[in-house]
Amino acid sequence: PRNPDVYAGMLGERMERYGTSVYLVNTGWSGGPYGVSKRIDIDLTRAMVHAAVSLELEDVECIEDKTFHILVPQTCPGIPSPEILNPRNTWEDKQAYDRRASKLAGEFSKHFDKAYGNKGIDPAVIAQCPGK
């Protein structure tokens, strides 16, 4: 196998060449920690996936989630309440969300460092790892 940086570069080059967008859709649980959270309604999931594959998300306003280094759309066609788009908004206790998100991002970072820390990964890629 090649260095992961080679594969990341190949993916990025092809995404740029073909104008590919990538969307991460939460099809699972939201609204709190285990035991409190609820499953995201299948109709909302379908609306989000439809908006992504039909390119309806290409021009919506997004904000950066600085913990996970992703852009979060502020609206989505077919989603009546945009609060569901940002997981923090679905938690009653926002500080609890912040703590959990920070802990999870730290776990991503720790695993990344352990698995790829000595692989010569491009610093621009490293900077996008949650927790970095």
Image (cartoon, rainbow, N blue to C red):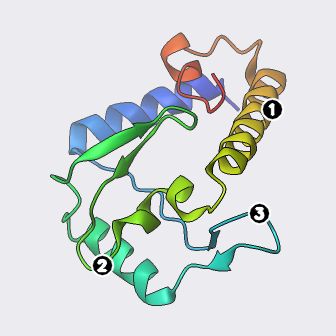
Q: CA distance from mark 1 to mark 3?
A: 22 Å
Q: Quadrant of residue 70?
A: top left
Q: CA distance from mark 2 to mark 1?
A: 37 Å
Residue 53, how many percent across, how many down? Answer: 28, 69
Q: Earlier in the sequence, mark 3 or mark 2?
A: 3
Q: Is residue 98 above or below residue 125?
A: below
Q: Earlier in the sequence, mark 1 or mark 3?
A: 3
What amino acid is at disc 3?
Answer: Pro
Residue lying furthest left: 59
Disc number at residue 33?
A: 3
* Quadrant into which the C terminus falls: top right
Q: Nearer the viewer, mark 2 or mark 1?
A: 2
Tell me whether circle 3 and circle 2 mark residues in contact (CB < 8 Å).
no
- Left of 70 or right of it: where is 56? left
Say what secondary structure mark 1 lies in. helix
Say what secondary structure mark 3 lies in. loop
Crowding at label 3, few (<14), some or many (≥20) Cα neighbours within 10 Å? Answer: few
Disc number at residue 80?
A: 2
Identify which residue, 83 or 109, lies in the foreground: 83
Q: In this figure, which residue is indicated by the disc labeled 1?
A: 111
Q: Residue, x 18% and y 65% (percent of image)?
A: 56
Q: Is residue 93 above or below residue 56?
A: above
Q: Residue, x 23% and y 59% (percent of image)?
A: 57
